[in-house]
Amino acid sequence: MNCKNCSYPLKESDSYCPNCGSPVEKDIYQRPTKTNSNRQVFGQSYSKYIFVVSLVLMIILVLNLSTAFNSLSGLKGEIQANASSLTSEQLSLFNKMLTLSQVETAFIFLNFGATLTLMIIAAMLRKKAKLNVAPEEALLKTQFYLSIAAVALGTIFVIYEIIALQKLNDIANQLGAAVHFGFSYLVLPITFVALLIPCIFKSLSVLRNN
C-alpha cells in the first residue's frame, strides 16, 4: 500500500507516513488494482472458454445425434417393411422406442434454447461491464452465475441423454437390431468436465473476494 499524499510505500503497521507525516487511514491507502483488473480479465477469459467449449460440445452433439437419428430412421423403415411378421411385443417395443426418441428430441431443443438464452444474457452483461454502463463487479458476478446455470442445464441434459440413449439401445437389442450412437457416451461427459473445472475455480475466487 502507498501513501495517498506522497505515494511513499507504507507498512501495515504504519500509523503515519514516514516520508510526509500524513496520518494513515483506510481511505488514504492506494491499494494495488490487482483485484478488479484480475477478476475482469479472468471473467472475460472464462466467458470465452465457456463459449468455445460449448460450441465444440454442440457440434459434437449434433454429429452424434445425427448418427443416432439416421440409425433410428433406418431401423424404423426396416421394421415398418416387416411389420406383418413382428409380434405384438416387438411392435410395442418399437412404439416405445419412437416415443422415447421424440421426447428426447423435444428435450434437446428446450435445453439448447434455455442454455443459449442464458449465455446470450451473460454475454450482454459482460458487454455492459466493458462499457461501464453498470457496476462492473456485480455484472461480472451475475454473468458468472448465469454461466454456471447454463452449465448446470447442460449437465442435466448430458445425464438425460446418456440414460435415454442407453434405453434406446436396450430396446433396439430386444428387437434384434443395432442403433449407432457415435461417441456420445465418452465425449459428452468429458466435455462437461472441462466446463465444470473452471466453474469450480471461479466460484472459489468469487467467494474469496466477497
Image (cartoon, rainbow, N blue to C red):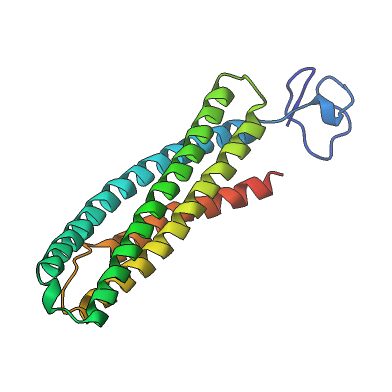
**Residue 62 in view, yes or no:** yes
Residue 188 image point, x, y percent: 34, 59
x 47%, y 41%: residue: 46
**Residue toward you, 98 or 17:** 98
- Between 56 and 25, the one lying in front of the other is 56
- Coordinates of residue 146 in the picture (x, y in percent): 56, 42
Q: Residue at x 51, y 54 (%)?
A: 152
- Residue 125: image location, x then y, percent: 56, 29
- Residue 209 lies, with reference to residue 187, above or below; the image says above
Residue 115: image location, x then y, percent = 46, 44
Q: Quadrant of the N terminus?
A: top right
To which quarter of the image does residue 86 belong? bottom left
Q: Residue furthest front?
A: 84
Q: Residue at x 58, y 25 (%)?
A: 129
Side (left or right) of 166 relative to 207: left
Q: Is residue 18 visible?
A: no
* Rendering quarter of residue 141: top right
The front one of 126 and 93 is 93
